[in-house]
Structure formats: structure tokens, C-alpha cells
Image: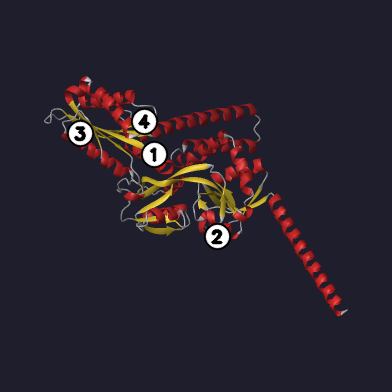
Amino acid sequence: MRLKKIKRYLLCTILFLGTSAFSAFLVAAGQKVDSEQSSDVTYCIDPNWAPYEAIRNGVHVGISAQYMRLIAEISELTFTLVPTESWQQSLEFVQQGKCQVIPMMNTSDYRKQFLDFSQPYFEAPNVLVAKAGMPMLQGYSGIGNRTVGIVQGYRQVEYISRHYPGLRLKLIPSEEEGLKQLANDEFDVMVGSLMSVNMHINNLKLKDLNIVGYAEPFDSLAYGVNKSYGHLVDKIDYAIERIPETRKVDIYKQWNNVQVRYSRNYTVMLLSTVIVLLFLLLFITKSRNKSGFKRIISQKNEEISALQAALLEKNKTLAFLSAHDTVTGLYNRNHMIQRAEEEISRFHRFHTTASLIVIELSPADVSADLSDSPLKEEALKAVATNCLNTVREVDVVSRFSGEQFIILCPQTELTAANTLAVRLLDSLTSHYILNENFRTAMGISELSESEEFAEWFERTIKAVYQSKRQGYGNVFVAE
């Protein structure tokens, strides 16, 4: 009889525990469903990364803010800002779950441990900044023993530590503060985002700071989502894919040109101020001549439109001149270095090879001084014309220095590049000005593994020297 009571007691206990566990499971499942169905999303940002994103008077502004509004409209998510004081604090908050997402950040192996990422929706270059007088730097490999300033928590810290462990780093709280420290000689070179650096240099009037090179890799910015809320990634990706291209272009134009208008063109701002004051004056005095008022507004608007059109045209002209040689119209040295760095980056990602062709002219008469003669200018233009008529559309032709030209052949193996170089040499040597007054040396090389542009270019120049030693008029392939 006692044994039956014990059995009955054990059976009741098991049923009670099973019922409790099942109830707890249902509650947890219900909470998870509620979390996935909720449209309220908390987020943190970098509070000091204008114009990409920033917090001003408690409000989220910048490029990421405009994209977030578009994504909210499409996905029907409601985003609520969790203010932070620094980028490092924002990373800590999203890792701890105090905010669910960060709307503009790069992916990295470390961040993937606690974040899921959407597809990238905005790309931007990183640059090296130094005081005036610093020579152009070929990426991180050209920094040498100089100290590099970089914002704490940025993906570049992880990248440099892995690929350039010998560089000396100084962690800074923000790009704005870093530029101030750089101007005060607290370190030698700073890594920053192009648009942000340009804005801060102009706003702080740091005239002795210049951009001296590009810093790999470029930013490919996406949403970072705490892994506990990974279901949000699909909704965000859905919205990103449906943002119209025209809206993306409008956002880029707005923030890319804002600093030029702020620092260089006061005419539009002055006219706008005059119009506003005139409008207020007429409104207060309740002018009876409404038709005259509308005519003045229309006239001023036309003037503003004309000034904006002129400014846009000048910006296009400046952009062209900054990337082209004034004599030949070819790309200049800086643009060639940028394109070569992009090709090297593509090679590292996709293993698509590339080739480099270097052409160098020398006077046929060593004693002749052709440095400033019209004949030299005609010869340079002749080389440019022959190069453009011979190379393919994908090839990039530049006047790299005085009598030196470079042709970058993307996704081209050495054999195909050699064929192109021989055909180009025949074209150059058959030109009457070049044939009678100059000798042509030419070297080619194919991009190698783990090779930076400076090393690639130096190897090709050695081939040019070999071409000269063999009497010019030939193509020498670099080892």
C-alpha cells in the first residue's frame, strides 16, 4: 500500500514538472515571435562622422539618416536612436544588445562574431592626410616609420594590425579631433574617410593639411545587426534592393557638394539671405503689390539657378583638370596611381591579372635641348594620339611624368599585353616627328602576388632601362 502511494506521488511530480517546462517553452516561443514581429528597432551611430552620420542637437543627421528614412518607408520598420558619445561606445552598445543595429559600418572578421550584416549600400574611399610638404604615399606600404592616427574601433585598425603589423598606430576619438592633433604635430599621418576629411579640413580652416594618398581598403558600408535580431537583415536587404537609383544619386550629390557651397561660394547664400529678408519685410508690412513681390522672387530664383548651374559646370571642370594632363589630355599621375591601386585590390579579391606598359621618350640628339620646345609638345601629343588609337577601351593611358607614359591593361595577361605593346611601338616609330627626333624605349610587366603599385612600377621601369641598353625601339619584358 505504501509503495503505491510513492508511485502515485512520483507520477504527479513528473506531470507537474513536464507541464511547467512546456509552459516555459510556450512563453519563450511567444516572446521570440513577438520580437520578430515587432517593427520597433533601436540603433546606434557614430556621433562624430559627418557627413556620413552624426548626432546634432540630439538628432541623427547625414547620409545614413537619409538612407534610414528610405529603408523605414519601404520596410515599415520604426527606427529609434540610442544616443552615444563615441563610435567605440556605439560598438559596445550593439554588442551588448542596448541597441539592435548600426546603420553604417564595414564588415570585418571580428565584428562578424556578434553581428550579422546586410548587403552594402554605400561605398566611399579612405585617404591618407598629412601636413603640407609630405610626399605622395603609395598606401600603407609607403608610410614607413611614421606614426599613423586612426579612430578607435574603425575597421582600418583591424586591417592594419593584420596586414601591416609594423606600423605604429595612435588611436584617436574622432576624425575631427584627429585632424586637430595632426595639425599640432602629435603624429605624422592620419587615415580618414574622404568626404569627412574634406569637410573638417575646410570647416576648421586647416590650410596646411593635404591628402597625400589613398588607404586600402575602401569603405563598403552596410547595416550591422546584433545576432539576436538577425531576422531584421532580410527586411533591411529587401528595402535596400528597392531604393531607386535616382534617390541614391541625389543623396550623394547633396552631401558631396555641401562643403564646396559652404566654403567657397557665398554668392548663393547671400542672395538667398536677401530674398528671405525681403520676403519677411514684405510680409510684415503687408505690401499690396503682390505681383511685384512674385516677380522679384522669380527673378532671384532664376539668378540662383544660373549660379548653381555655373557652379556645377566649374565643379565638373575642376574634376576633369584634377585627373588629366594639361598638355596631352591624358590621365595624370594621381589618377593612374588611383586606378592601379583599384586594379591591385581587384586582383587580391578575384585573382584577375593585369599588365603595365611603360613608354619613355629620349631625344635622338643627346646634345639637343628640347625641354621647352614646340617640337617636344608636338611629340607628346603624338604619343597620346597613337596610344588612344591603339589601345582598347578598357585600358587606361596616362602621362606619368615628363616624357614617360603608362598604360594600365586590366584583366590582361603578359602575352596579350606584349602583343599590344609591339603594335603600339610600330605605330610610334612610324610617326615622322617621333622617328626623326626621338627614340622610344618600352617595358612591360604582369602584376605579381602581394605586389604593391610602387614595386610593380619599379619592376617595369627596370625593363625600360633594359630596352634602352638594347638600343631603343624594342619592347622588353620585366622579369
Point out the image quarter for the N terminus. bottom right
Q: CA distance from mark 4 to mark 3?
A: 22 Å
From the viewer's perspective, tell me whether residue 257 is left or right of residue 338. Answer: right
For the point 54% across and 36% down, the residue is: 250
For the point 52% across and 31% down, the residue is: 304
> Label 1, on which residue?
343
For label 2, the crowd category at 10 Å Cα-Cα, with few meaning under 14, some 14 to 19 and many 20 or more, is some
Do callouts 4 and 3 mark residues in contact (Cβ within 8 Å)? no
Q: CA distance from mark 2 to mark 4?
A: 46 Å
The count of marks equals: 4
Q: Mark 3 vs mark 1: which is more N-terminal?
A: 1
From the viewer's perspective, tell me whether residue 195 is left or right of residue 275. Answer: left
Q: CA distance from mark 3 to mark 2?
A: 58 Å
* The disc label shown at residue 467, or none: 3
Residue 180 seen in this snapshot: no
Residue 428: where, in percent of width, then height? 25, 24
* The disc label shown at residue 92, or none: 2
> Label 4, on which residue?
395
Q: Mark 2 vs mark 4: which is more N-terminal?
A: 2
